[in-house]
Image (tube, helix red, strand yellow):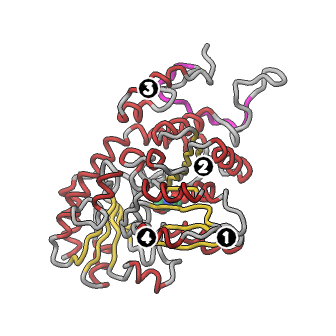
Amino acid sequence: MRNFKDYSEYDKKENWKVGSKLVHGAAGGDPLTGSVSFPIYQTATFRFRALGDSLGFDYTRCQNPTIEELERTIAMLEEGTEGFALSSGMAAVMCAFSILKPGDHIILSDDIYGGTYEIAQTVFVDNNIEKTFVDLSDLNKFKASIKPNTKMVFIETPTNPMMKVADIAEISKIAKEKGIVVAVDNTLLTPYYQKPLTLGADIVVHSATKYLEGHNDTIAGLVVVKDEKLGQAMRNFLKYQGACLAPLNAWLTLRGIKTLEVRMQRHNENTMKVAKWLRNHPKVKKVYYIGFEDHPNYEVTKKQCTGFGGMLSFEVDSKETALKVIEKVKMIVFAGSLGGVESLITYPMIVTHHEVPEDVREALGINERFLRLSVGIEDADDIIADLEQALK
Ligand SMILES: Cc1ncc(COP(=O)(O)O)c(C=O)c1O
């Protein structure tokens, strides 16, 4: 019988294309039993054969084979050295922030995910961590916001919901010179379309709840690093905060990852069609979508991403139209998440960004006429038909 820690099969995957790596994961099944589907090791603890003699696992909060398979899979996909599976995307964000100490300064994308914004407004204040929200699609603004005590820049790219794109390589180059850690929330594009660590970032964060798991049925978070010291800090956070992912949720995430390539390709294709259709609708004033050639950051997108993903936002002619759309959609679901197989529409002003002060929200463009659409993998014609009847 082989040992769990025998990963010789894994090494053979180096030359595989990404679609094959996604389907097979890191270990390619259960090294112990040969089970093709990696088993769910639903256990809290592991038997010691003798003092100091185990199969490498002792307690699920610290290690578990199913969780480890997910951690090794995401590390392989993001081209990092170590992955960490956490109970939610928020836990993953907090894990990245755990290296900040009182007196440190952090720079964050200005229209960051609402939950991350809340962390900045509460946890950072309580812990005397200084913060600056910056439009990171503008390198000059980023440079101007750096202070002697800047410890981290936290990038979301594209941002959500305004779909601004930051140049990860250029920001990383500048940050490196100043000893600033670069963390990227890669939830929206996933390693299938964007690999921040290969562009110079130090930490990648995921709400795996979204595209990685992909089915709107699990909450999960992932972190990947390429530096040993950062890895130790992430592991300590996970262990001491007790923010581990449950084995079942790790398995659901692994199962979702198997189909990431086909799902992302379909999201990408559908979103392009829907974005183009929306743009020509008389009641739609503006469509925010990174796949448009006239998007202000299109060149950066083309340089650092291999696809445009499944997200878009749009502004309609009035608040009444916006409210009517969320009330009248039939197949598209009015719900506050993204990245799953079902198309979801949301009203960011109330649902995702209610904690953001009105003046900040308005300045970003998140107004009462603004809607965000996570384009699912249904037939694009049906998504368009649903929007058409809802916009009537
Ligand atoms: C970009 C982004 N990061 C992090 C999170 C938080 O993830 P979770 O909801 O899995 O805790 C979300 C959730 O919507 C998100 O959209």
Circle 2 crowding by C-alpha within 10 Å: few under 14, some 14–19, many from 20: many
Residue hosting label 4 = 140
* Badge 2 or badge 3: first in the primary sequence: 3
Which is in the foreground here, disc 1 or disc 2? 1
Circle 1 crowding by C-alpha within 10 Å: few under 14, some 14–19, many from 20: some
Q: Is residue 96 above or below residue 336?
A: above
- From where the camera sits, is residue 287 visible? yes
Residue hosting label 3 = 13
* Badge 4 or badge 2: first in the primary sequence: 2
Between the residue at mark 3 and the residue at mark 1, the CA separation in whole angstroms equals: 42 Å
**x and y percent of residue 366 in the render?**
39, 78
* Badge 3 or badge 1: first in the primary sequence: 3
Which is in the foreground here, disc 3 or disc 1? 1
Who's the residue at 54% across and 35% down the image?
72
**Which amino acid, mark 3?**
Lys
Locate residue 69: give its quadrant. Answer: top right
Task: Judge by depth and name the residue closer to the eye, 149 or 383.
Answer: 149
- The region drawn magenta spans 33-46
**Image quadrant containing the N terminus:** top right
**Which amino acid, mark 1?**
Ile
Task: Judge by depth and name the residue closer to the eye, 147 or 204.
Answer: 147
Who's the residue at 55% across and 68% down the image?
107
* Badge 1 or badge 2: first in the primary sequence: 2
**Which amino acid, mark 2?**
Leu
Residue hosting label 1 = 129
